[in-house]
Structure formats: structure tokens, C-alpha cells
Image (spheres, rainbow, N blue to C red):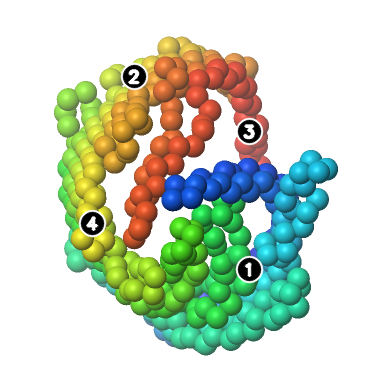
Amino acid sequence: MILYCFHKPFRTLSIDVSLNSSQTKNNSTSNTLTTFLSEIPAEVRMDQRNETKATTTTINPVVSYTEPLGHNQAMELNYKFRYNNTDVNSQVFRLNNDSHLYDLPDSLQTNHFNNLYQTHQLMLNYRLNNNKWHVVAGIGVERDRIKGSNITRDSLVYAKYYSMPPSVNATWGLSAMQRLQFSYTGMPLALSVEQLQPVQSTVDSLFIQKGNPHLVQPYMHNANLTYTFTLRSERMFSIIMNLGSVRNAIQYAISQLPSGAQVSTPVNLNGTYNGSASISYSFPMKTMKSSLNMLTSFNYQHTPVLLNDVKSSTKSSGIGERISWQGHIAEQFDYYISSMTNFFKVHYDMVSTNYLTEQLTANARYYYNDWMFDLNLYYVFNNNLAPGYKRGIPLISPAVSRRVFKNHAGEVKLSANDLLEQNLNVSRITTANTIRDTMTSVRQRYVMVSFTYNFRSFKGK
């Protein structure tokens, strides 16, 4: 970053450039067997290998000029350019039963796609900063250009989008202990390569994903209001409210084929919005030099759904309560205990799902000379799982460490993760026409020895 300060106070010019380039390679093999339970039973096996190479290059220069207007006021003009070029080459091969090799190209799923996304943004901001007010408000002009080249099928997707993104961030000091903050942001959302490329992919022949080169750029609105009241006795009370909506949001249209398979295609739909609120109160306690924090949260989300060309909506809401207690006994013992309970309700047409989750956490740490003993306890409960899955999972992870060397620059640590070998990642996703339980294999019990050394150098002049 280069910053130049003119002779006039607070008049500045800055230039910042960030560069990033990355390349990923992914080779995956899938072997699925689909059984159709119809009058004439049938089985379809899909054994394939996917070799994908993705290269991404990003360049982000930013030029900003600030001109003071008087006491505590200034105007800022900045220009941002974003260059993002992504090249994805995905080769899919099916198993050859004669050679037992993956040497049969799948022309329907094989695809080489290049996506160029360029953004030009010019913003003009006004700044005001005094004893009571801190305001940053601005508006700009933005142009986004998308150029997608399907090299495999020799086709081109080209689009331009224009927008005027506004931005407001204002903080009002009501008093020495009260503060009200408001922020609003409007911004376009970038489209991804997977959403635009006009190809289909599947691993089990039952769920087929297709891109849509005719998507329109979504535009997001987000507003936030925060009230904070701090007392001299270290008590704090706050209320946070957030509202958001997306115009031309990217949702997925599901089509049911006569064979039973589903085709998912990204489309633009209006009617996506959400809201949330939270109330927090914390205060110190004389008992064991501790503090108690209570947080109550509410959230609501409305999402449009397109199923077999029929539009409907999914409504989800939730309420949660978190209570945490932390403190220390003398200087040798620290502790943290928390409980978080959430109740969720998901409604789609005539179908509703209600479920409860509970998370209990307890951390304790004891210091003795150069030794440190840690104990982490965690328990999670989720009743939104199908029969056969464990709804309650306890985790215990102890550790012991010792500081070594001069000035305690080194640390040797012995830790055990998931001592009871209970860790399991299970989740349920409810959509317009499916309920899917997913279990992911995770590393359970293991013991690790680690060594950490801190390099420190503080030399006076």
C-alpha cells in the first residue's frame, strides 16, 4: 500500500493492490447403485471418475483520494477494480468393464469453461466526525462484466450489469453511556462459474445439476440497527436488529422426471428476505470474581421455491437462549460454562418441521508454576434426526502443557481429543420436497504432542 500526504492537513492519496493466484486439482471416483422399486425392478450402476483442474487469478487495485471540507468533515473519492479469471477443466470418464479402466469419456458431463468477471466501481463518500456523530455516507456507480467461454461446446456467455450501490454507516452518541448505530448497504452479488456453465453433472443418476447461462445478477439490501447501553458498574445492555432482502436471488428450480430423478437448475426468484434480532445483557457477579451473560435471539427467513414450475415458499424461524458464566478463582483457576438452547420451525405448504438443539460447554484451566492443565467438556443434543442416529453426543478433551526455556519462549503440550470416542457429524437438511440426513466421517479419539516456540525481540533505541 502506498500513502501520500499532501501539504494540506488530512488531504491524502492512497493506492493499494492485491494479487492472488491459485490452482487446485481434484480427482474423485464415485460408484453408486440405484434400485428402482417399480412393477419391473431395475438397477442402474454409475461408476465414474472426475478429474478437475481449476485455476483462479484475482487482481484488486484500489485508488482513494480524501479532501477535507472543514472542521471534522471530508469527502472521499475511491475507485475499485476487480479482475477475476477462473478456468475450470472437468474431465469425466466412465468405467470400461472390458479394460477395467476409466477410459470412456462422458461427453455430457465433461466440460472446459472459462469465466472472466470484471468489476469497475466509483464511490463518493461523505464523512462527518464530531463528539456526537460519526457518519460515513456514499453512493457509487458500478459496472460488472461477465464473459463465460464454454471451450468444449464452443459457446459464449456475455453479460453486462450496471448498478448504483449506496452505503450509510452512522453512529450517534446519545450520552456518555448510550450509543445508537445504523448501517445500510446495497450491493450486487457475483455469479459463480458453476451457476453459469451450461452443463449437467451427477454422481447417482437421481440428482442432476445443471447450470443456467441466462441468470441475472442478484442485488442485496441489508440494514442493521444497534443500541448499546453501558453502565459504570460494568453492566452492558444491547439490542441488535437486522433486515435483509435479495432481488433476483439465486434459487434452485427442481423438476421431477418420470424416472424418479430430479433436475436442479439455478434460477432468479424474488421474495428472498430475512430478519433477526438479539437482546444481550451482561453483568459482573461477586461470586468467584465472575460475570454472567444472557443472550436471547430471534430469526426468520423466507425463501421462494420452484418445484415442477409451481412457485411456493419455505419459511423458517427460530428462537434461542444462551447463558454463559465465566470467571476465575484466585490466579490459578479459570473457568467458562455456557448453555445454548435453540428451537426451530420450518414450514413448507402443509408440511412443518419443529426441532430443538442444545449445546453445553464447560472449560476449565489450572495453572501450577510452569504447568497448565486444561479440560474441555462439550455436549450437543439434536432431536431433528431420524431413528438410529445418536441425538446426544458428549465430547471430553483434556490437555496438559509446560512452558520451557528462558522467558517461557517454548511450550510442550500433550492433548487428547474426543476421549470417549463419541464425535459424529450428523445433520438434517429439509427442503421443499426432500428431507436428507447426512453423516460425515470425522476423526475421533487421538492423542497429539505439540511444541510451540515464540520468537520475541524488543530492543530499545
Disc number lying in front (1 or 3):
1
For marks 2 and 3 on the same chain, the one whose residue lies earlier in the sequence: 2
Residue 194 seen by the camera: yes
Location of the C terminus by quadrant is top right
Q: Secondary structure at mark 3?
A: loop
For marks 1 and 4 on the same chain, the one whose residue lies earlier in the sequence: 1
For marks 4 and 3 on the same chain, the one whose residue lies earlier in the sequence: 4
Location of the N terminus by quadrant is bottom right
Q: CA distance from mark 4 to mark 3?
A: 60 Å
Q: Which mark is residue 199?
A: 1
The residue that label 3 is drawn on is 456
Looking at the rendered structure, the kind of residue marked 4 is: Val
Tell me, yes or no, whether the two marked residues, 4 and 3, touch with CB atoms within 8 Å: no
The residue that label 4 is drawn on is 351
Q: Looking at the picture, how far across and down is residue 139, in whole percent?
A: 44, 84
Looking at the rendered structure, the kind of residue marked 2 is: Phe
Residue 365 vertical placement versus 193 (above, below) = above
Q: Residue at x 48, y 50 (%)?
A: 40
Q: Looking at the picture, how far across and down is residue 137, in whole percent?
A: 39, 79
Disc number lying in front (4 or 2):
4
Q: Callout 4 environment at 10 Å: few (<14), some (14 to 19), or many (20+)?
A: few
Q: Residue at x 46, y 86 (%)?
A: 164
Viewer-side residue, 271 vs 282: 271
